Image: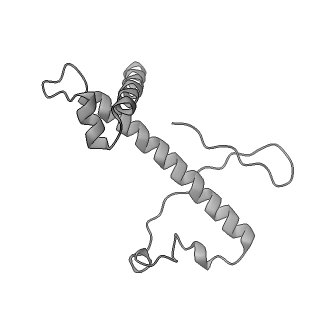
Amino acid sequence: MPEPHAAPDPRGGTPRFHRPAPLLFEPAAAAGEDEHFFDLESISDPRQLLSRSTELTLAFRAAADRAMEFQAMAAAQLADPKRFDRLSDEAIAQRADWTPDYARKMIEFGRELLHGRAEES
């Protein structure tokens, strides 16, 4: 998984690493309201708002990257020629709402990830 970018130090020093903020579930009462988003609307200090929204941005990016890796591994497993129920690239593309070319790239990426996992074990 790609590491989040280091945030620049506001004092002008070397960049410091920020761990992505945890993605907390929104309260049920706020989930249906468009103006509520992880309670950001309640933060009045722009410094705090920038900090928290940046944490959320990094967390969403990290979550999207990780989810994409799992998509790729699943696609590679579904396309494995050793499986009796193997799916074609086109069938995988259709299930994931991808183009066949993108499905082939994701399958290859997934194979690389799975191969790397096997080497680590």
Apparent side of residue 92 relative to residue 60 in the rendered image (left or right): left
Q: Is residue 69 left or right of residue 57?
A: left
Q: Which residue is nearer to you in this view: 17 or 82?
A: 82
Q: Image quadrant for the C terminus?
A: top left
Query: Quarter of the image holding residue 94?
Result: top left
Q: Quadrant of residue 68?
A: top left
Q: Position of residue 95 (x, y in %)?
A: 26, 42
Tell me: residue 7, above or below residue 30: above
Vertical placement of residue 13 versus 57, above or below? above
Seen from this angle, which residue lies furthest left? 84
Question: How is the structure coloured here?
Answer: one colour
Residue at x 38% of width, y 24% of height: 108
The residue located at (18%, 27%) in the rendering is 86
Q: Farthest residue to the right: give it.
A: 12
Q: For this view, does 15 lie left or right of residue 99?
A: right
Q: Position of residue 31 (x, y in %)?
A: 41, 74
112, 117: nearer the viewer: 112
**Does 36 sit left or right of 72 as displayed?**
right
Q: Quadrant of residue 28?
A: bottom left
- Looking at the picture, tell me which residue is in the foreground, 32 or 120: 32
Name above or below for residue 112 compared with residue 20. above
Residue 64: percent from left, percent from top: 47, 47
Numbered marks: total: 0
Give coordinates of residue 11: x percent, y percent.
86, 54
**What residue do we see at 69% from left, 44% from top?**
6
Q: Residue at x 48, y 42 (%)?
A: 65
